[in-house]
Amino acid sequence: MKEKNKLKEEKKLIIKFDASLYDKVAVLKTCYIFQDRCHTKTETEKNSSIKVILTPKKESADLQQIENQFWDELIDQQVRYENDNLFSDIRRLIVEQAFRPVSFADLKNKIKKHAI
């Protein structure tokens, strides 16, 4: 199956792509980002593909530009999603350490040790 298959009908942009390449969360976040300039609709199809229909809110919108921006944003959101999954444990540990309670006595001792 091709990664994408688009059909342009009456100022609508229909983008189809393989659901195994992009997570649903990344697709929905991308559609959300496009809400300011397009009406968006997502559908899943029987052959494990996702169809996104973008209808520009402005008549003068350039469909090719919208399509290019959509693909760029979809890739960005997919990478963010994958990085979040890869590094969420590390982020959680950093946040735990940053907000761990510190006793005033311990802090005072550490300051004394580093004082000149």
Image (cartoon, rainbow, N blue to C red):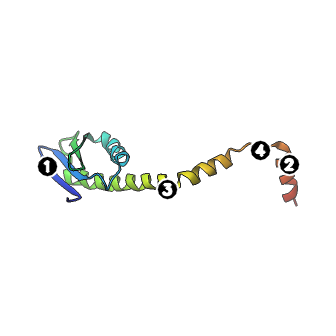
Residue type for callout 4: Val
The total number of labels drawn is: 4
Q: CA distance from mark 1 to mark 2?
A: 68 Å
Quick check: marks 1 and 2 in contact, CB under 8 Å?
no
Q: Which residue is mark 2?
A: 108
Q: Residues within 10 Å of mark 3 (few under 14, many from 20)?
A: few
Query: Residue 86 got which mark?
Result: 3
Quick check: marks 4 and 2 in contact, CB under 8 Å?
no
The x and y percentages for residue 60 are 18, 45
The x and y percentages for residue 92 are 59, 48
Query: Residue 8 got which mark?
Result: 1
Q: Closer to the N terminus: mark 1 or mark 2?
A: 1
Quick check: marks 3 and 4 in contact, CB under 8 Å?
no
Front: mark 4 or 1: 4
Q: Which residue is mark 4?
A: 102
The x and y percentages for residue 17 are 24, 53
Q: CA distance from mark 4 to mark 1?
A: 60 Å
Front: mark 3 or 4: 3
- Direction from residue 49 to residue 25 in the image, left or right: right
Nearer to the camera, 107 or 47: 47
